[in-house]
Structures are given as structure tokens and as C-alpha cells.
Amino acid sequence: MRQAVTTLTVSTRGAGLVEVTAQVRRWVAEQGMETGLLTVFCRHTSASLTIQENADPDVQADLLRFFRRLVAEDPSLYAHTTEGPDDMPAHIRSALTGVSLSIPVMAGEPALGTWQGVYLFEHRARPHRREIALHLIGE
């Protein structure tokens, strides 16, 4: 078994989904492993990861609107308000969606479905630079 690790840096424009599938696929291909398991890990508590449809951008827009309705940006609801009205809701959204993905690697590439893409889900209103750790174990 071999292992490989790297970190991707992703710039966001504020709340929304940023597709990172191409960067993940490229790095996996560079490792030359035919089979294995890829872990994708977001190193933040106010952003998360998800696998979603990558064909229709309405999916990402609907997800963003849904999470805004689900977790209100109302400071009267939270004790943690020192970092702005979007910070505690961002932590809750991150807890709901998760910060880690496990993706099988088959035939040298992530075994994603036809319409699946890997996304960083930015939950804060302002732009950020986010780090995603990739760990591949395989042969």
C-alpha cells in the first residue's frame, strides 16, 4: 500500500458552492494509484464539503437558499455572535453537512457518478481562502 497527501487552497466569493472536482481528479491521477480510498477533508469549521449534481447550477442555488432558510442568520438566536451574524449559522451548517468525504478510487480515478461533483460549501458571507486536505491510500 502507498499513501499520498496534499492540500488544495480554494478561494471563495462568499456563501455558495465551489466545485473542486477537477483539482481532485488531477491530483489523484498524478499519484498513479489504480485502486484505493480518497479522503477529502475541509480544515475549517464554517465551511464544509458535499458531493452534489454538477450539471445544473440550479441545484447549488437551491441548496444555498435551503440552508439560509433552515439556519437563520439572527443574532438573537445564538450566544456566539462576536464574529458576525453569519458565523454561528455557518458553524451549524457545517455541522449538518460535514467536513469529510470518503471516495473510492477505481481505475485510477475517483469513482464519482456521472452527475456528481465534489464541492466546498462556503457558509460565510465574505470571501475566504479555504484549505482542503487530500489523503489517498491505495496501490
Image (cartoon, rainbow, N blue to C red):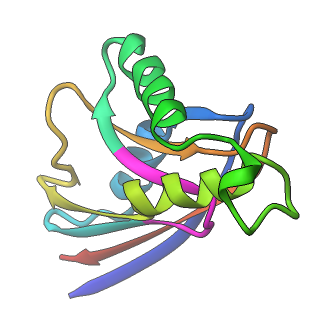
Q: Is residue 8 visible?
A: no
Residue 39 figure quarter? bottom left
Q: Report the front residue among 62 and 26.
A: 62
Residue at x-position 50% and y-position 52%:
93
Instruction: Give coordinates of residue 61: x percent, y percent.
Output: 47, 18
Q: Main secondary structure of the magenta part?
A: strand
Instruction: Give coordinates of residue 130: x percent, y percent.
Output: 68, 55
In the image, is residue 130 above or below residue 70? Answer: below
Q: Report the front residue among 105 and 67.
A: 67
- Taking the image as shown, residue 94 lies to the left or right of residue 106, namely right
Q: Which residues are magenta?
A: 41-50
Q: How many marks?
A: 0
Furthest-bottom residue in view?
Answer: 1
Residue 122 figure quarter? top right
Residue 97 figure quarter? bottom left
- Taking the image as shown, residue 36 lies to the left or right of residue 126, namely left
Residue at x-position 51% and y-position 45%:
120
Instruction: Give coordinates of residue 64: x percent, y percent.
Output: 50, 29
Q: Quadrant of the C terminus?
A: bottom left
Residue at x-position 45% and y-position 63%:
95
Q: Is residue 89 visible?
A: yes
Q: Report the front residue among 27 and 69.
A: 69
Q: Quadrant of the N terminus?
A: bottom left
Q: Is residue 92 magenta?
A: no
Instruction: Give coordinates of residue 101: x percent, y percent.
Output: 32, 62
Q: Report the front residue among 9 and 70.
A: 70
Residue at x-position 49% and y-position 24%:
65
